[in-house]
Amino acid sequence: MDFQSSNLGRANLEGAYLESANLEGARLGLTQDQLTTAKLCRTTLPNGITLDPNRDCKELGIDPETGEWIGP
């Protein structure tokens, strides 16, 4: 998923599955708080977001290096 230039300032990302999502160019107020409950794995985060972009890979059963399914 490519969210470059998307306005995510008011988006509810609670529980969102953002595996391999590109949020690098997201604009207009995307905050770290919006991503605290989203599932992140191989996610490209915008500047200023300090969350681990691979924090949920193990839970999702995905190898963060290759993106291959490895199972839970």
Image (cartoon, helix red, strand yellow):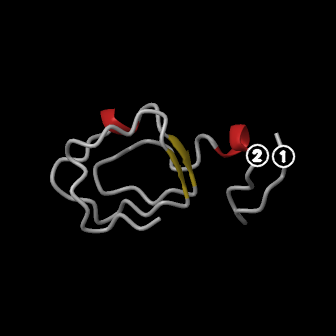
Pick whichever, 40 or 1, lies toward us.
1
Q: Residue 71 — which label? A: 1
The type of residue carrying mark 2 is Gly
- Tell me the SS state at disc 1: loop
**Circle on res. 61:** 2
Q: In the rendered view, tell whether residue 69 sits above or below residue 25.
A: above
For the residues labelled 1 and 2, the Cα–Cα distance comes to: 4 Å
- Locate the C terminus by quadrant: top right
Where residue 70 appears, as percent x and y from the top left, is: 84, 52
x, y percentage for residue 54?
Answer: 58, 48
Secondary structure at badge 2 equals loop
The earlier-in-sequence mark between 1 and 2 is 2
* Residue drawn at the location 46% of the way across and 31% of the way down: 37
Q: Image quadrant of residue 55?
A: top right
Given residues 50 and 29, the one toward you in this image is 29
Q: What residue sits 68% from the left and 56% below the top?
A: 64
Does residue 71 appear left or right of residue 67 in this picture?
right
The answer to whether marks 1 and 2 mark residues whose Cβ atoms lie closer than 8 Å is yes
Reply above or below: 6 against 28. below
Residue at 77% x, 62% y: name it.
68
Q: Is residue 31 above or below residue 7?
A: above
